[in-house]
Amino acid sequence: MTTALDQLVELLDLAPDGPSAFSGQSPEEERQRVFGGQVAAQALVAAGRTVDPDRHVHSLHAYFLRPGLVGEPIRYEVDRIRDGRSFTTRRVVAVQRGQAIFNLSASFHVEEEGLDHQDPAPDAPAPESLAGFAEQMAPYAEELGEWYLRPRAIDQRFVDAPSHASLGQPNRASLRVWIRADGRLPPDPLLHACVVAYASDMTLLDTVLLAHGMSWRQPGISGASLDHAMWFHRPFRADEWLLYEQRSPTASGARGLATGSIFTVDGRLAVTVVQEGLLRYRPPDPRAGSGARRLDTGPSEPRTGSR
């Protein structure tokens, strides 16, 4: 039986499309745009496929340029910027219908010894002590609709109440959630980095809304990822529990900034994430009825909080 994780791994297994290009697919789903985390993960796969396996990704910086079209292939064109003695740099442009929809720069580094320190991991209950996604989100099943029922490749267990449960409770601009791939993955470090890149876009911008006691399902809210950066500090497995601590230090000018720290179960800081997102709030006109006004203005799908 094919699982949601099997489907994600297949999604990340890009097909060669020339000496420095790859082709990726998108799942057939009821959404307006391709999920931004998918494009980032596939672009990182494309970059990593052109790098010596003894070099591991240590950072990526990406911009979402246009909405990705669901159901159409995406071509990932890799520019081999530099192959140095210690570092390798790649640039990837994702293209659909002849137009760039996303670009990514990634740097890969050989293992070296050096100074070592980190911030401590936050306190959090063990993931096994928390209810799974279906149980935690059951009170909001009707509100979430199809998103509640769909199979999930990423197991999420919220330590803090998600935005759906925080309407009208502003000023808590933080969120802790345990994440892991819902099944066992092959040992390839690039695949584990790409799965975490995929998962890192799932809840990060929620923290911006939490600061204002708002939810993605609230009428008048629309948003999209604008850019995304990640730094990979220490080895980890994406199929083992990772604590994702997320915060939003600021929002202004219809943009919100969110930062994330991803820790292993034993408290090692594995990944740091920073993202800026477009966030627009247009309160619906009460004379026009109570329906939400969906603004199709950003480069990734309309945000729906937890996926």
Image: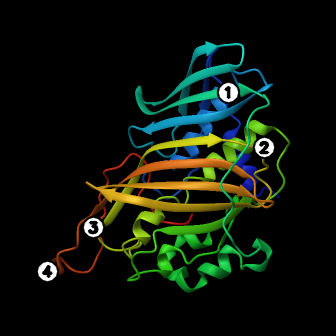
Res. 223 image quadrant? bottom left
Residue shown at 74% from the left, 40% from the top: 191
SS of the residue under disc 1: strand
Which amino acid, by three-letter code, is at mark 3?
Arg
Which amino acid, by three-letter code, is at mark 2?
Pro
Residue shown at 29% from the left, 76% from the top: 291
Which amino acid, by three-letter code, is at mark 1?
Phe
What is the C-alpha distance between the residues marked 4 and 3?
Answer: 13 Å
- Quadrant (top left/top right/bottom left/bottom right) for the C terminus: bottom right
Answer left or right for 299 relative to 261: left
Q: Earlier in the sequence, mark 1 or mark 4?
A: 1
SS of the residue under disc 4: helix
Which amino acid, by three-letter code, is at mark 4?
Arg
Q: Which residue is mark 1?
A: 108
Q: Is residue 153 above or below residue 217?
A: above
Q: Earlier in the sequence, mark 1 or mark 2?
A: 1
- Quadrant (top left/top right/bottom left/bottom right) for the N terminus: bottom right
Q: Mark 2, mark 4: which one is toward the viewer?
A: 2
101 or 258, which is in the foreground? 258
SS of the residue under disc 2: loop
Q: Which residue is mark 4?
A: 287
Q: Earlier in the sequence, mark 4 or mark 3?
A: 4
